[in-house]
Image (tube, rainbow, N blue to C red):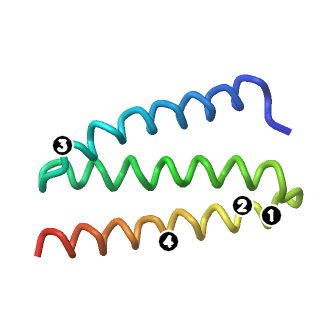
Amino acid sequence: MKTHRETLGHWLLQRITAAFLIPTILIANVSTLILLNILLFWHIHVGIEEILADYVHHEVTRNWILILLRVFCLIIIKYVFVFFVF
């Protein structure tokens, strides 16, 4: 079970990444592409982590899903970066 402080931290991180996504998308160029990818996938990761915390009660399963999600996000960030740079 998460403490109030952990839940508040996730909630705040979700709002901060969402707030930074808007200007980053509007100023989208090659230099902000890396920041945009990191913010976008971090925002997705935090959101899915909260969903998993609510609905997946087996801790080992939840941890494996989070590990696979992180690997997936890193792979997608790499492919998006390579697609736009080259």
Q: Is label 4 or label 1 in front?
A: 4
> Residue 58 placed where, x, y %?
88, 61
Marks 1 and 2 in Cβ contact (< 8 Å): yes
For marks 1 and 2, give the CA distance. 5 Å
14 to the left or right of 3: left
Q: What residue is rendered at 46% in x and 65% in y?
A: 73
- Mark 4 vs mark 1, CA separation in Å: 18 Å
The N terminus lies in quadrant: top right
**10 Å neighbourhood of mark 3: few (<14), some, or many (≥20)?**
few
| Local SS, label 3 | loop
Circles 3 and 1 in contact, beta carbons < 8 Å? no
Kind of residue at disc 4: Phe
Please indicate whether residue 31 sits to the left or right of residue 36 in the image.
left
What's the residue at 13%, 52% (across, down)?
Answer: 29
* Residue annotated with mark 1: 60
Q: Which residue is mark 4?
A: 72
Callout 3–callout 2 Cβ contact below 8 Å: no
Instruction: Give residue 63's quadrant in the image.
Output: bottom right
Question: Residue at 59% across / 70% down in the picture?
Answer: 68
Q: Nearer the viewer, mark 3 or mark 2?
A: 3
Q: Amino acid at mark 3?
A: Ile
Eye-nearest disc, 3 or 1: 3
Relative to 25, residue 58 above or below: below
- Secondary structure of the residue carrying tag 4 is helix
Which quarter of the rendered picture does the C terminus lie within?
bottom left
Q: How many marks?
A: 4
Residue farthest along the front direction in this orientation = 26
- Disc number placed over residue 63 in the picture, else none: 2
Calculate the distance from the C-alpha at mark 3 to the C-alpha at mark 1: 40 Å
Q: Position of residue 77 (x, y in %)?
A: 35, 65
Q: Which residue is mark 3?
A: 27
Vertical comparison of 79 with 26: above or below: below
